[in-house]
Amino acid sequence: MVLPPKLARLYGDFRLTHAPRPWVISNLVSTLDGVVSLQVKGHDEGGDISGFSAEDRMVMGLLRSVADVVVVGSGTMQADRKHVWTAEDICPELAPDYRRLRDALHKPRTALNVVVSASGKLDLRRPVFTSGKVDALIVTTPGGARRLLKERVPSSVQVRTIRGNAAKLSAASILDEISRVHDVTHVLVEGGPSLLGVFFKERLLDEQFLTLAPQIAGRETGDRRLSLVMGTSFAPKDPLWGRLVDARQASDLLFLRYQFARAAGRLGRRTVRSGRLKRG
């Protein structure tokens, strides 16, 4: 993939796998001790974890630019109430470069924003639904849909129902429903940890982009701070191992990229690319 000149200078070589099915990637930032959200009012977004890193925002924008769909859970939307999941929103200073990249990839102006909520308890006044910046899709249960349809759903928002329990919807059914309404080659999952855990559990996560920030957040016994994956466990009975395929550095942050079991057949010889990210 040939990036526009400024993005190529900032990031370097960037390759994305193409497959005969949706290729699912995730991107999150974590402290050294594995915290991805402090769960403190006013400090529960990724910026508090990354130190508001410009390089981290640049990578987030890059991944949103190559994605057809950005998927978030209701908790992630709740944490960032004014957010719209576009490259321009997270890194406005590179907006023209992101648009050039999407144009070169023959993608629409923005990725479809998908909000997953089994309960349907969503504030439909949020910018992701009302700003007109993105098309939005809500994936929910029949009960959640009944709750939503009692409100005024904006015309730019689709509501799709799939069977599931009150707590979780399956990753496979989420992907199936997205594919029914949108052409998809690359899906970006931006959390939260419970939604990401479902994709990992069903072995439907191909790649994890992980920004590792040089911060120790710590935990008190019984606090609500979140790690990368919540709501499911793997080791020691069913350990889930990834393969490091890319490692880059910017200041004291590491930008790591792992591929997981669903991609194992395509990994081939082990090659780890590395480099340094640059500031705009």
Image (spheres, rainbow, N blue to C red):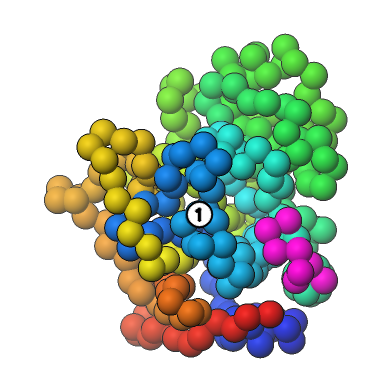
Residue at (27% x, 62% y) in the render: 241
Residues shaded magenta: 89-96
Residue 269: name its quadrant: bottom left
Secondary structure at numbered mark 1: helix
Q: Position of residue 146 (x, y in %)?
A: 65, 14
Say if the magenta span includes residue 274.
Answer: no
| Front in this rendered view, residue 262 or 39 | 39
**If the image is split into quadrants, where does the C terminus sit?**
bottom right
Say if the magenta span includes residue 90.
Answer: yes
Q: Residues within 10 Å of mark 1 (few under 14, many from 20)?
A: some
| Front in this rendered view, residue 226 or 143 | 226
Q: How many marks?
A: 1
| Front in this rendered view, residue 201 or 61 | 61
Residue 277: name its quadrant: bottom right
Q: Position of residue 260 (x, y in %)?
A: 37, 63
Q: Residue furthest left?
A: 236
Q: Position of residue 244 (x, y in %)?
A: 36, 74
| Front in this rendered view, residue 211 or 147 | 211
Note whether 58 is above or below 141 in the view shown.
below
Q: Which residue is mark 1?
A: 48
Q: Main secondary structure of the magenta part?
A: helix
Residue at (72% x, 27% y) in the render: 124
The three-letter code of the residue at mark 1 reads Asp
**If the image is split into quadrants, where does the N terminus sit?**
bottom right
